[in-house]
């Protein structure tokens, strides 16, 4: 049943990476698109956490930090099987925890119809799950992680923009049932379902607001 959700704040904000982990490809097949409900994504904010780069890696981590907040995407329509694959992808440096996030709602500019739309926190807090760093803080860099730089410079390593042996290993890792298999995220990055929807908004606009 596709009734699960998760908050993503790093590489999994990219739809291509999310599909690669959950379904083995950067896009759903036509059969998947027809047979399964859509995965819905919304820009959201997670309070009382801070995001850091993981040293010498492409991906970030979050740790508790009262008074801070992290922007990301709330993805709904996931299944228990999806979360099992995501667990394997994240590996043992992260722990999936229950958290509460607030959606970022679009605020129209009443003065100009063509003005960029702004977002603000709105609506009730939503209970979901996210992956919190559980390893030593010594692996974390104080600098903020840059999603746009990841898309521009590192995406090809994660979403199959070209043939790459490490991506094949990632697919094998997240797809295997062997409990001792290496987690997908740890295999590289160190120096199926329906269409992903944006809740009536362009997905690019959602992602822009989430970073």
Image (cartoon, rainbow, N blue to C red):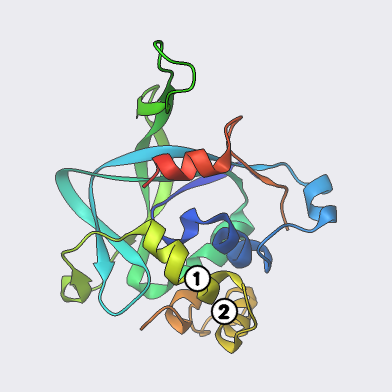
Residue at 23% across / 59% down in the picture?
Answer: 144
Q: Examine the rendering and report whether any part of residue 6 can be seen.
A: yes
Where residue 39 sits, quadrant-wise, is top right
The residue nearer to you, when weighing 120 against 115, is 115
Disc nearer the start of the sequence (2/1): 1
Give percent across and percent down for residue 199.
Answer: 59, 32
Q: Quadrant of the N terminus?
A: top right
In front: label 2 or label 1: 2
Where residue 37 sits, quadrant-wise, is top right
The residue nearer to you, when weighing 204 against 189, is 204
Relative placement, left or right, of 114 versus 72 is right
Q: Is mark 2 on a helix, strand or loop?
A: helix
Give percent across and percent down for residue 99.
Answer: 35, 44
- Alpha-carbon span between mark 2 and mark 1: 8 Å
Relative placement, left or right, of 37 versus 50 is right
Q: Examine the rendering and report whether any part of residue 1 can be seen.
A: no
Q: Is residue 39 above or below residue 158?
A: above
Where residue 22 sits, quadrant-wise, is bottom right
The residue nearer to you, when weighing 2 against 71, is 71
Residue at 29% across / 61% down in the picture?
Answer: 145
Disc 2 crowd rating (10 Å Cα; few below 14, some 14-19, many 20+) is many
Relative placement, left or right, of 94 versus 176 is left
Label disc, if present, on residue 188 of the rendered structure: none
Q: Mark 2 points at which residue?
A: 170
Q: Mark 1 points at which residue?
A: 89
């Amino acid at each position: 049943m596709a009734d699960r959700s998760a908050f993503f704040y790093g590489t999994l904000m990219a739809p291509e990476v999310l599909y690669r982990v959950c379904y083995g490809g950067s896009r759903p097949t036509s059969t998947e698109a027809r047979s399964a409900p859509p995965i819905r994504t919304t820009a959201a904010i997670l309070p009382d956490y801070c995001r850091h780069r993981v040293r010498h890696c492409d991906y970030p981590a979050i740790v508790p930090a009262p008074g801070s907040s992290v922007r990301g995407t709330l993805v709904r329509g996931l299944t228990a099987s999806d979360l099992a694959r995501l667990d394997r992808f994240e590996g043992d440096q992260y722990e999936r925890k229950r958290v509460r996030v607030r959606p970022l709602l679009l605020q129209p500019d009443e003065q100009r119809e063509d003005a960029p739309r702004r977002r603000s926190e709105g609506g009730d807090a939503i209970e979901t799950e996210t992956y919190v760093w559980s390893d030593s803080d010594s692996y974390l860099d104080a600098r903020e992680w840059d999603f746009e730089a990841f898309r521009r410079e590192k995406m090809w390593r994660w979403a199959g923009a070209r043939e790459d042996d490490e991506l094949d290993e990632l697919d094998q890792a997240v797809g295997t049932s062997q409990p001792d298999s290496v987690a997908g995220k740890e295999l590289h990055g160190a120096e199926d379902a329906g269409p992903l929807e944006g809740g009536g908004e362009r997905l690019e606009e959602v992602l822009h607001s989430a970073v």
